[in-house]
Image (spheres, rainbow, N blue to C red):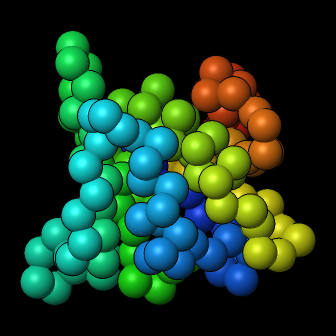
Amino acid sequence: MSNNLMVVAAEPKDFTVTLEQFKEASSYWQPHGHFSEGPITEDSKSDATIEVNRPGEPSFLIIHFRDQVALSIDGTEEQAAEVAVWAMNSFPRTGPGEVWLLDQAYSGHTVLRPGMSAAEALAEWQEHS
């Protein structure tokens, strides 16, 4: 599992997160999270981030994309699992397909379920062969 992970559905219509939804749900990360609207870089496909900086832990970003079909996490595996669980519980599926925690190398994934724990998200990781 790489450190850059995403929450995404195999079919884009099955998981969408609007900018407004992302902004509203950012309050979960308070008092250590800071919502910022705008791309990370000028040519970036992102339109908003939540920077989480908890004492004693590495800081990380949760990145929202303009196309509304994925969230990206640049934190540790544990932080990514927490973000994945938050996403499943904050943004309901918009279709019948699976939503995954997926590494950007496409080497493995976890099928996310509402109500699952971050520990379950890590334990249920499946390597791709």
**Above or below 16: residue 111:** above
Give the residue displayed 47% in from the left and 75% down from the top: 20
Foreground pick, 33 / 102: 33
The image position of residue 51, as x and y in percent, is 25, 48
Can you name the residue that lies furthest to the left here?
42
Give the residue displayed 59% in from the left and 64% down from the top: 8
Can you name the residue that lies furthest to the top here?
56
Please tell me how many numbered marks the rendered image carries. Answer: 0
- Quarter of image, res 126: top right
Foreground pick, 79 / 105: 79
Give the residue displayed 36% in from the left and 38% down from the top: 30
**Above or below 4: residue 65:** below
Is residue 10 at least partly visible in the picture? no
The image position of residue 15, as x and y in percent, is 68, 71
Foreground pick, 24 / 16: 24
The image position of residue 37, as x and y in percent, is 25, 72
Give the residue displayed 30% in from the left and 42% down from the top: 33
**Above or below 123: residue 60:** below
Going by the image, does 21 lie left or right of 19? Answer: right
Going by the image, does 42 lie left or right of 97? Answer: left
The image position of residue 21, as x and y in percent, is 53, 69
- Quarter of image, res 35: bottom left
Is residue 119 at least partly visible in the picture? yes
